[in-house]
């Protein structure tokens, strides 16, 4: 399948265990003539690296109920996608061949009704979400309309100034709207992996969130505080002279060992507002699901861009009204599920984070504990490490008003 003229989009496949994510995605790739078994291993990447999410929900008896239960992953994955800024969502109601009776319209309508209520609750507009009954196993409604579900009249979604409609999953993907890419901002490239390739050297891999990257640029990595020159860039095994936001790339750097960099590091242009290590940051958080009370000193794992770092809630500064954002209380003694607050967090290990206002993909996060997402938040301000702040000021003077 040719990709000439197509916009570059990153799609993440999310959903409860055994809902049919890999099967559905594999069948779609097969139908499009581009099956590559190695690619399937990367399809369940973190939602924070995607432009679009395909939420796969099983319609099979018992499986849907398990996915939307308190310990199910359907709700959690949808919430994470929204929190991490994934604006476009597609819902595949999968395993329609396993409903009772098979390909049941009644079961499809029941699943759609329940999922719609939750998606609306967390912030999505259901009018913009296509719901498609599919079978990842038999291929129904994957790349062409199914003859086994003639009752399905197709999906229709609202765009800014028009409507889009169709029948299959492939048609939905073809009508997705490319997001606005902030190429005019300084470079921010969170690393997903770092490889050592024989005859080439150290090759970090990641998605460009903002800015552009070119061979010959000198880039710095935070919080590891290394600087290196970019020798070459590749995407899909093809060399690039310029890499733009949204590109998943690998790039070869000079004179930096593979053990000096790791997942969660952030690359930036050393001459234009380079990324730096944060010693602490102020965030507005919402407590979603915690069985007890959260006090100062609480230390969950913070998932922000590609980093996973334990951070301490060092100060509970303000309790807020969740709807209006108005302050309700200074220095609350504790927080519980449903509360919103301004909190100061201190990373336990070196960590790079940015203000949401400056770099949204690096300024929103989820807090995880007890094998679940306990809170979500956005970064309001960042305190930089003194040494890197001094280096940053020396390279780019701060204007004085």
Image (cartoon, rainbow, N blue to C red):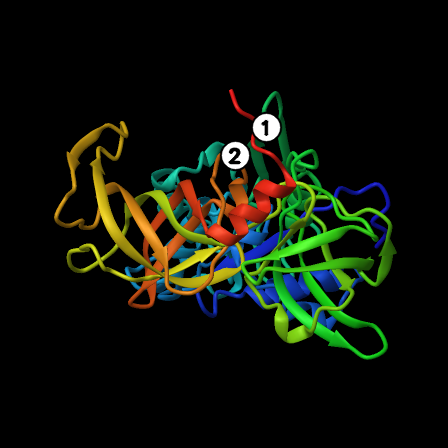
Q: Residues within 10 Å of mark 1 (few under 14, many from 20)?
A: few
State the residue at coordinates (43%, 50%).
365
Closest to the observer, 318 or 106 = 318
Q: Name the residue under label 1.
A: 159
Q: Residues within 10 Å of mark 2 (few under 14, many from 20)?
A: some
Left or right of residue 38, residue 6 in this image:
right
Q: Which residue lies furthest to the left in this view?
A: 333
Query: Quick one: SS at disc 1?
Result: loop
State the residue at coordinates (78%, 65%).
254
Q: Which residue lies furthest to the bottom in this view?
A: 198
Closest to the observer, 71 or 191 = 191
> Which image quadrant for residue 223?
bottom right
Query: Quick one: SS at disc 2?
Result: helix
Q: Where is residue 128 in the image (x, y as percent from the top left)?
A: 52, 34
Q: Where is residue 94 in the image (x, y as percent from the top left)?
A: 52, 59
Badge 2 vs badge 1, beta-carbon distance below 8 Å: yes
Q: Name the residue under label 2.
A: 128
Q: Position of residue 297 (x, y in %)?
A: 22, 59
Which quarter of the image is occupied by the N terminus?
bottom right
């Amino acid at each position: 399948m040719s990709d000439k003229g197509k916009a570059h989009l990153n799609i993440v496949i999310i959903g409860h265990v055994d809902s049919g994510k890999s099967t559905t995605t594999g069948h779609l790739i097969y139908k499009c003539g581009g099956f590559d078994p190695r690619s399937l291993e990367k399809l369940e990447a973190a939602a924070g690296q995607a432009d679009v999410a395909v939420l796969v929900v099983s319609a099979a008896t018992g499986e849907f109920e398990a996915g939307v239960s308190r310990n199910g992953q359907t709700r959690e994955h949808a919430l994470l996608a929204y929190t991490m800024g994934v604006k476009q969502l597609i819902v595949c109601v999968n395993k329609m061949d396993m409903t009772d009776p098979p390909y049941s319209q009644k079961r499809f309508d029941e699943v759609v009704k329940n999922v719609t209520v939750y998606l609306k609750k967390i912030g999505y507009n259901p009018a913009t979400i296509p719901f498609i009954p599919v079978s990842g196993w038999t291929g129904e409604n994957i790349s062409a309309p199914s003859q086994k579900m003639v009752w399905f009249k197709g999906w229709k979604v609202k765009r800014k100034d028009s409507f889009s409609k169709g029948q299959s999953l492939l048609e939905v993907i073809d009508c997705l709207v490319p997001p606005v890419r902030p190429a005019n901002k300084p470079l921010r490239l969170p690393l997903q992996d770092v490889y050592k390739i024989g005859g080439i050297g150290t090759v970090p891999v990641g998605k460009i969130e903002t800015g552009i990257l070119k061979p010959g640029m000198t880039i710095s990595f935070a919080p590891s505080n290394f600087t290196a020159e970019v020798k070459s860039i590749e995407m899909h095994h093809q060399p690039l002279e310029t890499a733009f936001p949204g590109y998943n790339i690998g790039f070869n750097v000079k004179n930096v060992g593979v053990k000096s960099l790791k997942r969660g590091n952030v690359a930036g242009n050393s001459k234009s507002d380079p990324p730096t290590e944060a010693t602490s940051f102020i965030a507005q958080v919402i407590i979603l699901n915690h069985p007890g009370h959260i006090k100062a000193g609480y230390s969950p794992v913070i998932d922000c861009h590609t980093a996973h770092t334990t951070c301490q809630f060092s100060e509970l500064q303000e309790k807020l009204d969740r709807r209006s954002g108005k302050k309700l209380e200074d220095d609350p003694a504790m927080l519980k599920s449903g509360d919103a607050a301004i909190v100061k967090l201190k990373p336990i290990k070196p960590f790079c984070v940015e203000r949401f206002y400056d770099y949204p993909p690096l300024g929103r996060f989820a807090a995880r504990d007890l094998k679940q997402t306990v809170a979500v938040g956005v970064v309001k301000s960042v305190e930089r490490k003194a040494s890197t702040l001094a280096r940053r000021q020396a390279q780019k003077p701060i204007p004085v008003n």
